[in-house]
Amino acid sequence: MFLSSGIRVYNGQSMSSLWIAIGSWIVFILLIEGTMWMLFNRRFHQICLPNQGERTFFSYYTIWRNRLAMILHISFLIAVIVIAYIFLWP
Amino acid sequence: MMISDRTAGYRFQGKDEEEHFQFYFHQHWIRMLWPTFRLILWNVLIVAAGFAILGTGSLNEPYIRQTILLILTAFFLLSHFEYLDRWFHYLLYVIVVTDKKLHRIKKTLITTDDHESTDLWVIQDIHKRQHGIIQNLLGYGSLILEAQETEVRVHFTPLISQRYEQLMHLRELARTRIASIEEFFRQGKTP
């Protein structure tokens, strides 16, 4: 429901379905990204750890920075979904 | 990068105890250019579709809005997971060069686990190929290593001129070592 000022107002039922939807997506994202990271980490440890840099564009892409990038990516996805759902959920 | 105290003890899949790590490399970052562009394109399309359908306020049926939002979210996440898979695939393709061998290790998260080793001393010819403006500007290209019956092609090799020189040098060292071993055995068998 919209007020005349354009601000969305949720009733109780809509509010709970909104947070159920957001919560489900967060669990889904954590599950998929966590599984992918676990599989990647297991494979990568068998090869060779880039603890030191190559002299290329990815010179700073060491394993812990990759982990940090994953955390930032997860945070980005969750933030996008939360913001989009708060504004667009009926 | 050549062998140093920091890298000498490197262990990786298939490494022999007598081998000494020299350097490794992934493919050039240009490999990730198209997947990155595709991810951006998908995101722009999804945001534009979401704004066009849901942002204007013309669609007020709650269940239809919810369904459309769920579908757009699914596509948004799918594009990101696909990119992530491509990124991991990129990181899991590594060329490792030791003082004796060249290891090509190619893995995916679940389905592929390839490891190809080539002795440096059996390599007859090493070709460096850089075709086109972009390859020459960004300094990447293909390395073609010809052995007796096999040919190893390493595409999208970054810093190709440097890698080429390092490989030539390591091959000569490996050949010298093999020649000295052969000489040692020949002298040992001579009465």
Image: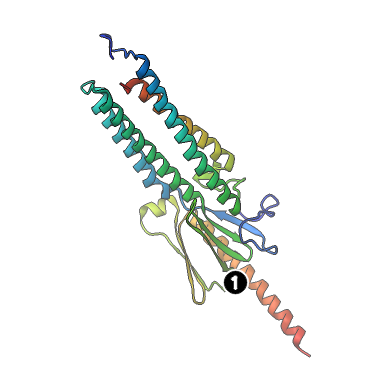
**Farthest residue toward the bottom?**
B191
Q: Is residue A38 above or below residue B56?
A: below
Residue at the image point whose x is 60% and y is 65% from the top: B101
Locate the N terminus of chain A by quadrant. Answer: top left
> Which of the two residues, B102 or A31, is positioned nearer the viewer here?
A31
Q: Which residue is mark 1?
A: B121
Residue B85 drawn at (x, y percent): 44, 46
- Choose between A16 and B190: the one closer to the eye: A16
Give the side of residue B163 with respect to residue B188, left or right: left
Badge 1 crowding class, 10 Å Cα cut-off, few under 14, some 14 to 19, many 20 or more, is many
Q: Which of the 4 image quarters holds residue B14?
A: bottom right
Measured from the top left, where is residue B104 in percent x and y?
53, 61
Q: Nearer the viewer, residue B43 or B28?
A: B43
Q: Is residue B133 left or right of residue B106?
A: left
Residue A31 drawn at (x, y percent) = 49, 38
- The answer to which image quadrant residue B47 occupies is top left
Label 1 resides on the chain identified as B
Q: Nearer the viewer, residue B149 or A29?
A: A29
In the picture as drawn, the residue positioned furthest to the front comes out as: A13
Badge 1 amino acid:
Trp
Quadrant of image for the C terminus of chain A = top left
The image position of residue A48, as x and y in percent, is 60, 52
Taking the image as shown, residue B25 lies to the left or right of residue B69, namely right
